[in-house]
Amino acid sequence: MPNSATAGAFLLILAIVLPVSGVLLSLVLGGRHAERIALILMPAGLAVALTIAAAVWRTHNVLQYFVGNWSPPLGVAFRADGLSAAMMVTAAVLICGIGLFARGQFPSPQQSELRAPLVFWTLLPAVWGALNAVFIGGDLFNLYVALELLTFAAVPLVSLDGRAETLAAALRYLLFALLGSILYLLGAVLLYGAYGTLDIVLLSGHIQAGPIAWAAISLMTTGLLAKAALYPFHLWLPPAHAGAPAPASAILSGLVVKAPFFLVIRLWFDIMPRMPEPAAAQVLGILGAAAILVGSVVALRQVRLKLLIAYSTVAQIGYLFLMFPLAIKPEMGDPWNTTAWTGGVLQAISHAFAKAAMFMAAGLIAEALGHDRIAGLSGIGRALPITVFAFALGGVSLMGLPPSGGFVAKAMLLTAAVAEGQWWWAVVVLVGGLLAGGYVFLVLARALADASQPLTLLSPISPSRQGVVVALAVCAVLLGFIPLRPLELLQIGRPDIAVGGIR
Amino acid sequence: MAFDTGVAVLVLGVAVWTIAARDTFAAVVGFVAYGLLLALVWVRLAAPDVALTEAAIGSGVTGGLMLGASTRLRRTDTPAVGEKPGAVLRLAAAVLCALVSAGLAAIVLLFPEPAPTLAPPAAANLEVTGLGNPVTAVLMAYRAIDTLLETVVLLLALVGIWSLAPDGIWGGFPGPRHKADSEGVLTFVAQLLVPVGILVGIYIFWVGSVAPGGEFQGATILAAMWILTMMAGQVDAPPVSQRWLRLLLIAGPAVFLAIGLAGFAMVGAFLAYPVDYAKVLIVTIEIPVTLSIAATLALLVAGPPERAPK
Amino acid sequence: MSDAILYGLCGAVLVGLGLFGLIVHPQPLRKILAFNLIGGGVFLLFGVVARRGAAAGFGGDPVPHALIITGIVVAFAATALAIALLLRLFRETGRTTLGSDG
């Protein structure tokens, strides 16, 4: 029986069907109801994600679903392992928080349909459904369709306010994303040509080191790096993420940009584990290090708060790719049982919470002041203390200070770097942390300074929205209480767990 | 073999023209020709379903969209002096692209012999689906989830395009108002061609279950007919806030989703079909999907709302 | 299958040509055209894979054919969105420059 016996397997379908239904209903019922539909969807989707995670944890096994009862290679499989479950719960919690925050920004009109609320509340479930499809996809072409779904849902969010800069940023984002997708598809074509299947598990059994496999993996990885905005493909990200409205920036920096990273993990650790590739992994690490350094330095020079936060995203994405040279061992053993694997994934999750909180805090500040120039932030610390506190908490995670998820993640990466003897990555992590401290304190110093004239806020900021922002920032901090060793949930589904156990 | 060599050379030649032409309009015309030649290549590669789709969507609708855009953007054709990349960059790009092409060409020659293929399992399971066209079986049965998600992708692209309307015009009419000229050539062509085109579109959709064709190809022809009547001024594009239009657009994915969920109740899996009713269910999905896709494609070409709603 | 190999080489050249156009042309509309060329090349390579997989009485492996059809439709949707963004940008600014390299 190919489908997992537990009820959790059908939940994999629900994880996609529920958001898609939300999109369809929003479109047909119209703008006045779109927000309500999204609000009903959020707890339902969160429940589905948590149930999937519970099922994966309880059975200590991968949840598998063959769509239509057609088994691969002819059919398409969905699979949720521990990593999928962790990412789905992260996405669900974040989208609930962002949705609650966005109620104040895109209120539904009483009478007729308005453009921005309808588009936002229709695209929010679309992003969610696409993310879930990426996290549970087990077939390379299905993942291609999921990536396109994600791109089409994310790009219009960038240009939602219709200004010329955001239109240009959205178009540039779209072109980079499309180039990434087509390179990914080209790699998948080569893999099918060589092995006759696009199923990840089947491919991992067949694949052998050779020119076709190497070319395919290189093409797919390059395409995914362009979508993840890893240096040198990072130029599209800052204007796009800074120009979007605050809740959209939170989704884009927190979640959307993690999906291609997730797929690189799938490619390298699920399809390729038997192909030795330490040199290639070093290339990913070098690009990651460049991203950390370039992104942080440019962030220090920014005049606008949202652009600073966006360049910080460029830098923090670099940490994600340090995981590859540290987790892939030259001897073909069990790469996932290392601290580096957990560190990389935790970096993705804690950065998602921290960055979402920071973007939303910046959004509240911009609403209050009418601008987001860092030089003009004086006095906002007194006017919006909760918001600035949330920003600071997010910054703590970015810097890698305890207690925070960022600290645990970076500590694990440091430990792995020292243990592997690749001490140069440790230097990069430490320097990156210092630079992050630089740009976070840059903002906080301004914000906490006294204003020369008393500050008048343009519009009152509701405490509930500030509360949501703080809640997400606190989540980033709570992740810091995870013990500093490989996380058992993330190991589920890694083939070695049956043999080697947890170290 | 000589014929194929000639076609391949022609395709490459037109492709080079598309990249190298100075005038954007000329490049787009080259692109349309390239698309039609590609359709011929698909026929030579024994892929008639793909040939139909390439001619209809890849060349026809895409070409129309690009021709319209290049006409509107005529004034911005010559790039500013500072924007054109220097000779060094062009040389570096040329070397990189030549390497990529060479690498891919080498891989084409390195593909394993005998080629791995899913044709046998596709053929073996064809009876279960009740279909005669294996490509339709893949689209609507074996990998139906891809097709379902694809309809949602199309819909999202439309939402994205609509989001570009200025706030005050939201809900209004897409595209400019085309004047109906009762003596004009376009009106004549529309009145003559559209009824035939609709019949052809329905036929191609219907025959797709047993022969080359199917919902995407049929939908494109129907969409092209709607676009033709809009351009001839016979009908106006509907305002995007209309309830019936929204229902038409989501009908396809919604029915697809509903029957997929019903599959769970009937057979125990999402998007599974009970053996005796497989073909009936598939056709039941395909009819609204064809209509939805036709509407979506036509509206994707029409563009964002430009005239305020009444 | 030598005609398949021939068209495979054709597809390889198309990908390179399209990539060149994407990098070198500053105008977004030319980039979109070049992207469609890359897509055509990738689909052609997939079609060659399908032709080589002819078996069971079919002229080609039907699975890649179906995936190519899906790909063509998705590529059209992408082109439509990109052109709509471009035209709206032109309406706002009167120019079509994207600034830094696209």
Image: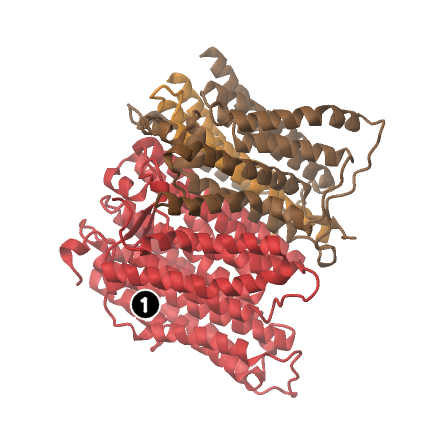
Q: Which of B262 and A110 is in front in this view?
A: B262
Left of A336 or right of it: where is C22? right
Residue type, mark 1 in image: Ala
> Which tint was used for chain B?
brown
Mark 1 neighbour class, 10 Å CA radius: few under 14, some 14 to 19, many 20 or more:
many
Residue A499, above or below B69: below
**Where residue B286 appears, x then y in whole percent?**
52, 36
Image quarter hosting the N terminus of chain A: top left
**Where residue B188 appears, x then y in whole percent?**
78, 25
**Where residue A228 appears, x then y in whole percent?**
44, 54
- Name the outermost residue toward the left: A499
> Which tint was used for chain A?
red
**Where residue C72 appears, x then y in whole percent?**
52, 35
Left of A155 or right of it: where is A427? left
**Label 1's element?**
helix
Q: Tell me which residue sits at (49%, 12%) in the image.
A: B3
Image quarter hosting the C terminus of chain A: bottom left
Left of C67 or right of it: where is A429? left
Residue B8, above or below A437: above
Residue B139 appears in the figure: yes
Instruction: Report the chain holding disc 1.
Output: A
Chain corresponding to orange in the figure: C
Q: Nearer the viewer, residue B145 or A226?
A: B145
Q: Tell me which residue sits at (44%, 35%) in the image.
A: B139
Residue A229 appears in the figure: no
